[in-house]
Amino acid sequence: MSTMRIGGLASGMDIDQLVSDLMKAERMPLDKLYQKKQILEWQRDDYRSMNALLQDLDSYIFNNLTLQSNMLKKKTTSSDESVVTATANASAANISTNLTVTKVATSATWVSEASSASYTPSGTDTTLKINVTNGDGTSPTNPVTITIAANSSLDSVIAQLNSNSDLGISVFHDTKTGKISIMKKDTGAAASLVMGDATTASFFQQLGFTGAANGAELTGKTAGEDAQFTINGLATSRSTNTFTINNVTYTLKKEGTASVTTTNDTDAMFNIIKGFVDKYNETIGKINAKLSEERYRDYLPLTDEQKEAMTEKQIELWEEKAKSGLLRRDSILSSGLSQMRLDIYSKVSDPSVNTNYDTLSEIGITTSSNYLENGKLIIDETKLRDAIEKDPNAIYQLFNASGSDFDTKGIAQRLRDTIKSTIGKIETKAGKTIWTNNQFEIGKSLNDLDKRIDAFEDRLKDIEDRYWRQFTAMEKAIQRSNEQSMYLMNAFGGGGQ
């Protein structure tokens, strides 16, 4: 039940202002609790931003350094790309291949002998059965069945035939001649379409394939052809124009002769390693900046009342200092960086690693001599390119050796272990956005502060009510005194008359 408040009518005092001023003093401990809560929230967010940096570095390492297909890329060149182009995977040998293309693969086609004008939509559903052989001689589960809905228009039929992946055909209706063309989407000499029953044959007859017959191949066919070529003197064929031999994928374009050369893609590995060095330097730079940030202890978080008296720019500048240094000399981050430096500089002793390239310094990556740069990596580009050209696989193993202990693990594996450990420790301290406060240390402290804030706010309500009761009692007393004085004055004044 709220206290009845009398606001200074008898005393002439501004009771509202008096109570407000008294409550300001009473609120000071509460303001400190709110400030402490704000600092913890800022610190939590700083920790999480550091985790985001570490996760970005880990993602770069995983997506680039650890994938053989990215690190050990091969480069192919064709003497005539109008005849043949090629790509190679990481396992391809560095060789030159001569190709003479005598025929490129083509697709089988079927053209109707007559117009499709005789097609009449059926009043009932029609089930077609077609036995399909692909250009390479393989077949889907035959027969391929298609149900044509009752009263389907010619356009609907064509759309349904085009959309069936097992048929693998492209159907075209020429409105000028009324004829229908069917092309097998894949290439090769083995392609065929065989009518599976009399109903199917009759249906295609209506489409203009007048010779269609049960158990026979669809009429109007021009057979597909296999690609014919000679590779390093060996005559051979393929059902498609794109095929892979010895980890090199060739694409034939036209008849002719060309040579294809496969070499190591030095630029690809160099760019990945340079990207890693840049990402590593960016990450440790931002973390070191946080660890060395100045802490301005006189700049506490602003209360709402303080903010009301300031401009937005003043608030921004104040909070910039208030947020500064919340991770200064943090032990989790400091130890994480120390371990990362150890990961980077220590020799990799795994048997898979070439002893000529078992440290980063041996491939041209060293530490900056400027101590203010806190372990920034520097690349000798000439030395790194030379190492990559001489033994790219050794460079790959330097980063990715799959040893069972620290000494035998590659640098990328060590770093990922350290990053994972550091992220885990930070999450124990500051959690993740999807976690509840009960799941991490700062969150538990925030919950405790919320309880203390709620209890203190309840106490402040009681204190404010007490002040009002006291001032109300005072007002009532002054009012009674004033009434008595007026009574006496009236009494004495009346007696004098």
Image (tube, grey):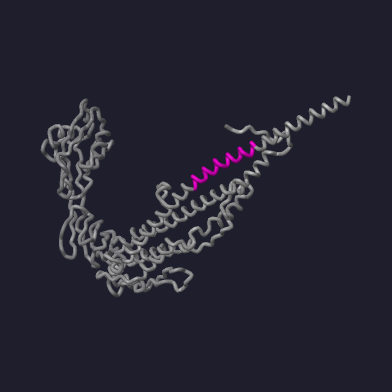
Classify 311 as above or below 400: above
Q: Main secondary structure of the magenta part?
A: helix
Q: Which of 335 and 358 is in front in this view?
A: 335
Q: Residue furthest bottom?
A: 356
Q: Nearer the viewer, residue 37 or 203?
A: 37
Q: Position of residue 127 (x, y in %)?
A: 18, 32
Tell me the quarter of the image containing the N terminus.
top right
Q: Position of residue 78 (x, y in %)?
A: 28, 63
Tell me the quarter of the image containing the C terminus.
top right
Classify 418 as above or below 29: below
Q: Is residue 424 visible?
A: yes
455 lies left or right of 132: right
Q: Is residue 75 visible?
A: no
444 lies left or right of 240: right
Q: Where is residue 48 in the image (x, y as percent from the top left)?
A: 44, 54
The magenta segment is 449-469
Q: Residue furthest left?
A: 215
Q: Where is residue 291 in the image (x, y as percent from the top left)?
A: 48, 62
Quarter occupied by residue 244: bottom left
Q: Residue furthest right?
A: 497
Q: Nearer the viewer, residue 40 or 292?
A: 40
| Residue at 47% over, 72% down | 370
Q: Does the magenta stretch include residue 459?
A: yes
429 lies left or right of 295: left
Q: Does the magenta stretch include residue 36?
A: no
| Residue at 11% over, 39% down | 216
Classify 221 as above or below 340: above
